[in-house]
């Protein structure tokens, strides 16, 4: 199985900050990488697929990059509604595997 | 708009069975692959199973293989997860999610249904 890791596991940031989260796969997955946002008590929401493509309706302040084993999710200017936990997931093969999540909270 | 509504969760004793449903609307269900994923309380996300648009292809996580069965009824736009021999570690919120094919990423997620396994 492909293992996914994320760093940091949590971070504190202020409104307006630029935030970057890193995701690493235990083997190359090309660009078969998705990012999800989950707010407390809510279902996950799809943000990015194919490492850098925005899901329909997702604001452009979110961006993704990377290929192979190393990926990043960037939020260009953090807003109150962005405080959440972010997960990466590989869909290169089965079983699909998620990273452990990065919790972004208010400084 | 796309809606995925899970149901069937509840409290069940260890070793017993439960069937979850996911009612889909707002898209052509019969052309989409569908997944189940779960999240134990306070924990991260875990993928559980996938079924192709026509039911011909299914994959399972090792943790549920042989105990869970994914199925679908395209005439009812409904996805199912039959769970038997439930264990304490199966307790979680179960989400269904759509994907344009078994090879592609999740598009939309349902709101989830809570399964509690307790004697």
Image (cartoon, helix red, strand yellow):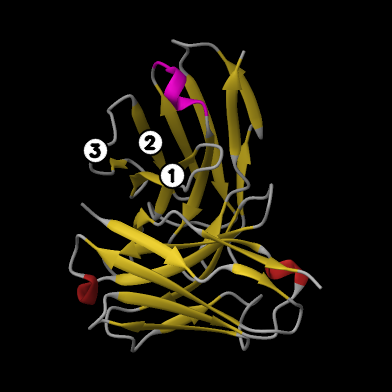
User: Secondary structure under badge 1?
Assistant: strand
Contact between labelled residues 1 and 2, with CB atoms less than 8 Å apart: yes
Are labels 3 and 2 assigned to the same chain? Answer: yes
SS for callout 2: strand
Percent x, y of residue A19 = 49, 21
Tell me if residue B113 comes above or below residue B59 in the rendering. above
The residue carrying pointer 3 sits among few (fewer than 14), some (14 to 19) or many (20 or more) residues within 10 Å by Cα, namely few
Quarter of the image with the C terminus of chain A is: top right
Q: Earlier in the sequence, mark 3 or mark 2?
A: 3
Rounded to the nearest angstrom, the CA distance separating label 3 from label 2 is 15 Å
Q: Tell me the mark number nearer the camera, choosing from 3 and 1.
A: 3
Subunit that carries the residue with mark 1: A
Judge whether B109 appears above or below A102 on screen.
below
Residue receiving disc 1: A35
- To which residue does mark 3 refer? A57
Residue B3 visible: yes
SS for dot 3: loop
Q: Residue A94 colored magenta?
A: no
Q: Residue A64 carries which label?
A: 2
Chain letter for the residue marked with disc 2 in the picture? A
Residue depicted at 74% across the width and 75% down the height = B87
- Does residue A82 lie above or below A47 as drawn? above
**Residues flagged by tags 3 and 1 on a common chain:** yes
Q: In which quarter of the image is the N terminus of chain A?
A: bottom right
**Residue A89 x, y percent position in the rendering:** 49, 53
Residue at the spot x=59%, y=23% of the render?
A105
Q: Please name whichever residue, B54 or A96, is drawn nearer the observer in this view of the structure.
A: B54
- Please report the residue visible at 38 percent of the width from the left and 36 percent of the height from the top: A64
Range of the magenta residues?
A: A77-83
Q: Do the residues labelled 3 and 2 touch (CB within 8 Å)?
A: no
């Amino acid at each position: 199985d492909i293992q996914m890791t994320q760093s940091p596991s949590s971070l504190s940031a202020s409104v307006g900050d630029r935030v970057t989260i890193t995701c690493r796969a235990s083997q190359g997955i090309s660009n078969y990488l998705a990012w999800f946002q989950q707010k407390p008590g809510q279902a996950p929401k799809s943000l990015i697929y194919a490492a850098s493509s925005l899901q329909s309706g997702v604001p452009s302040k979110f961006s993704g990059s990377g290929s192979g084993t190393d990926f990043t999710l960037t939020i260009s200017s953090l807003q109150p509604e962005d405080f959440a936990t972010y997960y990466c997931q590989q869909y290169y093969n089965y079983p699909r595997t998620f990273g452990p999540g990065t919790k972004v909270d208010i400084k | 708009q796309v809606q995925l509504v899970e149901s069937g969760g509840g409290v069940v004793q260890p070793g017993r069975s439960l069937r979850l449903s996911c009612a889909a609307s707002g898209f052509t269900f019969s052309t989409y692959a569908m997944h189940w994923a779960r999240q134990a309380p306070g924990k991260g996300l875990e993928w559980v199973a996938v079924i192709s648009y026509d039911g011909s292809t299914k994959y399972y996580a090792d943790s549920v293989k042989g105990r869970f069965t994914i199925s679908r009824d395209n005439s009812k736009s409904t996805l199912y997860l039959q769970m038997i021999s439930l264990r304490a570690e199966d307790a979680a919120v179960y989400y269904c999610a759509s994907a344009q094919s078994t090879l592609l990423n999740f598009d939309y997620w349902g709101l989830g249904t809570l399964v509690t396994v307790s004697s």
